[in-house]
């Protein structure tokens, strides 16, 4: 009797089990034509979780949650801190197998440092004068990286191979411009400045008006990639890839401009001092661009 009851219950539940299995099969895990995608580098998240369990108190927030600019792997670019820490990683699927993708990181900023300095002209007329002029320094720090290309994916299950090709471009530059409230003349050949005198004046009393820091760097090249994406949920994947890249880095010469009184000419002149020449680098090798472990959301 018990066997008969068991058989009847199994038979009654079979349709529901079949429906559940069919529902599972109907879930669309893989990306389809027309899907857009955004990706993030999950390493900062994993680091945050790890710190939460190892007693690390310096874990107040998750930083760099987004894509990672591809030039973060290059020492010449990441050492100057002119590139953004986060980029936008996006894709668009043209077909179920073919798509286009891009990684874009931008940072453009101007920093103004305005300070009061003694008004030399007013102080010459009245030693008790408290009149002030304004000295200004403007720091421009810019960086941008772009990777654009296409990809082909292979596989009908929840794990797919992803193969890509793209072009790379990046640049970074920084420069500083100074303007002073006290004019340089034949009478006042070393005007008072609000900035550190040793930072502004050289041994000939020529003061700094412009510098391009370490110069401008440009980065151009191509890359091919091979990786995998594991779809942990419908349209959500964890992925990693290795790139074979060829790129060329070239930088401009560095210089500074100064103004000073030339006694031989009897006037204030502007001179340009060259600090370092242009440089070139060629690189071919394998690396990880845009983050070592990514999570991608398709929608």
Image (spheres, rainbow, N blue to C red):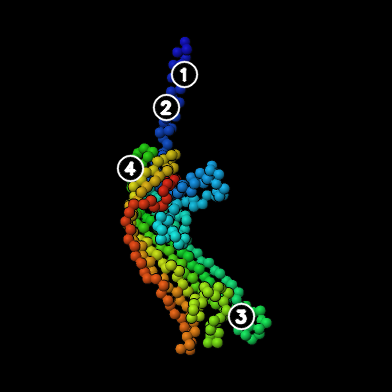
Residue carrying label 1: 9
- Crowding at mark 2 (Cα within 10 Å: few <14, some 14-19, many 20+): few
Residue carrying label 4: 154
Query: Which is nearer the N-term, disc 4 or disc 3?
Result: 3
Whole-number angstrom distance, CA of label 3 to CA of label 2: 89 Å
Whole-number angstrom distance, CA of label 1 to CA of label 4: 42 Å
User: What residue lies at 47% left-to-right and 18% top-to-bottom?
Assistant: 9
- Asked whether residue 244 appears in the rendered view, the answer is yes
Q: Is residue 30 shown left or right of residue 210?
A: left
Query: Which is nearer the N-term, disc 3 or disc 1?
Result: 1
Residue carrying label 3: 119
Query: Which is nearer the N-term, disc 3 or disc 2?
Result: 2
- Asked whether residue 94 appears in the rendered view, the answer is no
Query: Which of pointers 2 and 4 indicates the residue nearer the eye?
Result: 4
Whole-number angstrom distance, CA of label 3 to CA of label 1: 98 Å
In this orientation, which residue lies closer to the viewer: 71 or 5? 71
- Crowding at mark 4 (Cα within 10 Å: few <14, some 14-19, many 20+): some
User: What residue lies at 55% left-to-right and 73% top-to-bottom?
Assistant: 196
Relative vertical location of residue 75 with respect to residue 36 in this rendering, above or below = below
- Crowding at mark 1 (Cα within 10 Å: few <14, some 14-19, many 20+): few
């Amino acid at each position: 009797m018990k066997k008969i009851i068991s058989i009847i219950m199994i038979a009654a539940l079979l349709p529901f089990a079949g429906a559940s299995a069919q529902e599972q099969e109907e879930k669309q895990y893989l990306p389809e034509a027309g899907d857009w995608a955004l990706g993030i580098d999950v390493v900062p998240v994993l680091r945050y979780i790890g710190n939460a369990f190892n007693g690390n108190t310096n874990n107040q927030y998750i930083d760099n949650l987004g894509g990672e600019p591809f030039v973060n792997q290059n020492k010449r670019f990441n050492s100057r801190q002119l590139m953004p820490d986060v980029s936008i990683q996006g894709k668009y699927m043209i077909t179920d197998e073919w798509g286009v993708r891009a990684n874009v990181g931008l940072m453009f900023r101007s920093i103004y440092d305005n300070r009061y300095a003694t008004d030399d002209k007013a102080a010459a007329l009245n030693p008790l004068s408290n009149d002030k002029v304004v000295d200004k320094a403007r720091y421009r720090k810019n960086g941008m990286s772009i990777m654009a290309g296409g990809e082909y994916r292979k596989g009908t299950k929840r794990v797919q191979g992803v193969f890509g090709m793209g072009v790379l471009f990046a640049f970074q530059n920084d420069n500083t411009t100074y303007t002073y409230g006290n004019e340089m003349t034949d009478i006042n050949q070393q005007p008072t400045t609000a900035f550190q005198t040793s930072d502004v004046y050289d041994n000939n009393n020529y003061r700094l008006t412009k510098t391009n820091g370490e110069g401008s760097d440009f980065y151009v090249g191509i890359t091919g990639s091979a990786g995998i994406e594991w779809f942990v949920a419908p349209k959500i994947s964890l992925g990693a890839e290795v790139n074979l890249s060829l790129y060329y880095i070239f930088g401009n010469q560095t210089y500074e401009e100064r103004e000073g009184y030339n006694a031989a000419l009897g006037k204030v002149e502007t001179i340009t001092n060259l600090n370092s020449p242009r440089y070139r680098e060629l690189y071919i090798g394998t690396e990880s661009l845009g983050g070592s472990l990514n999570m991608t959301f398709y929608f």
